[in-house]
Amino acid sequence: MDIKVTRTEYQQMAETVSPKSKVLRNCVMAFLVGGAICALGQALTTLFLSFDLPEKTAKAFVSISLIALSAIMTGLKVYDKIAKHAGAGTLVPITGFANSIVSPAMEFKSEGYIMGIGAKMFSIAGPVLVYGTCASIIYGLILFLFKMY
Amino acid sequence: MPTRIGKYTLQLDKAPGILGFASVAGKKEKEGPLGAFFDVSHTDNTLGDVSWEKAESQLQTEAVQTALKKAALEGKDVDYILAGDLLNQCISSTFGLRSLGIPFLGQYGACSTMAQTLGLASLFVETGIARRAVAVTSSHFCSAERQFRFPLEYGGQRTPTAQWTATAAGSVVVGAHGRGEVKINAVTFGRIADLGIKDANNMGAAMAPAAAQTLHDYLTDTGASPSDYDLILTGDLGAVGCELMDEILEKDGIDIREIHNDCGLMIYERQAQDVHAGGSGCGCSAAVLCSIILRQLSSGELKKVLFIGTGALMSTTSSQQGESIPGIAHLVFLESQAK
């Protein structure tokens, strides 16, 4: 004999029973941690500018510093522990991008340098790069068209 | 020979016995509430090896070797070994057991694999095609994460309904029953049930209908009622799946809440060990069965147990293609012979 619950009924039951993510808490944590990373970026900018570096160079240095910091923290197995609480706060800034490249590189080392690290390194960041590039092309085209007239 | 009862249940008239059993656990599992019951445990989840896959293979090797040792048997005394795990092409089983020289049959039933292999091993012994058969399954948190989800160090958040794949293995040696061993009285292989759950992070919900259906089939076939048993042990529905299974059965007028427990809920302290909805993986139900449950059945603390292994039969490909998750559940009826 088959069970009596229908698909529609079951979707409703599963919805009711399944605990929801704590959206408010996640938002607050993301705001605080994400904001802290941005504040760190600003502090680094101020620091580099105080060395009389040109603004463009100083900004590049900030990105490099944040990426290096995130990569090191991923390597030390700390980044994911912070990210567990911070969520989008550690995912969205440039540090999250670095983590998404370093973590598969570490994980897939066991499959070798070519098919492991080389091929899998961009398995998470790949889509971001593809659609990021596409978006910037469209943006550039719009800008180009506007400047023609 | 087995007798078919009703439509789906096979009654084992000779009732094969469990000659030996063993469980192997990782660090987190050892630190959990069942820590004291595991035969072998590891503080380093690499097991001193170079890859997670090798570590998982080693879990299976150790589980089988320990179970054979406890049964005072050797590899040559076993006619068949039925084994499975979660990794593609079941490599933990094939690599872990390749040196044993026992005829090997790889099985895949996702997290239901322990019930599937134990059920089949019992039938092999019951029909006389094997004097002794071994059932073994394993899972490893790290090898499962990299295959199904994200790299370990990736900074993602797990949803509240997600389950934690146990780093563990369990093995059972089945043979003709003598005095004292735990008997296997009946087996019901389940039908696939799919009520349209698509969230791969909510496998409990995906598997609950299959578990309810298999138990329902068994009760209908045998005319038994839940109160005839000390324990209905599902593995591994987790907190969400357990509640849903109980609710589905309630709609059919079957109340199992009093005697229902789940391997995924037993293996960890859910809050303290931060495993969200509970444990999962074929090693979870295998290790729970082959530690506390079979010990309590051997001692007579538990008399009659329905062990229902549940599996979510999706792959990363099917999930990415937006398919729903088919669930499966197999039931094995275990009975103590202790006075």
Image: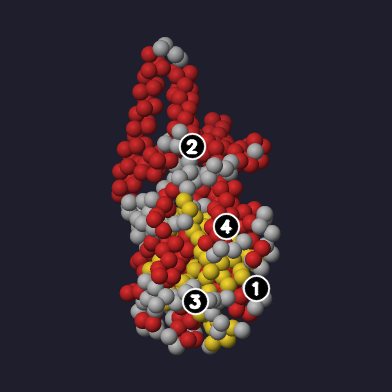
Other residues around mark 3 within 10 Å, as few (<14) / some (14–19) / many (≥20): few
In this rendering, the answer to whether B114 lies above or below A54 is below
**At 56% across and 37% down in the image, what residue appears?**
A105
Q: Which residue is mark 3?
A: B179
Mark toward the start of the polypeptide (1 vs 4)? 4
Q: Which mark is residue B130?
A: 1
Q: Are marks 1 and 4 in contact (CB under 8 Å)?
A: no
Q: Is residue B53 above or below residue B321?
A: above
User: Where in the figure is residue A32, as x and y percent of width and height?
Assistant: 31, 38
Instruction: Pick whichever of labels 4 and 3 is earlier in the sequence.
Output: 4
Secondary structure type for disc 1: loop
> Which quadrant, please, contains the N terminus of chain B?
bottom right
**Residue B41 makes an appearance in the image:** yes
Local SS, label 3: loop
Mark 3 and mark 2 on one chain:
no
Mark 2: few/some/many CA within 10 Å (<14, 14-19, 20+) = many
**Location of residue A1 in the rendering, given as x and y in whole percent from the top left corner:** 49, 85
- Mark 4 lies on residue: B65
Q: Is residue A82 above or below residue B199?
A: above
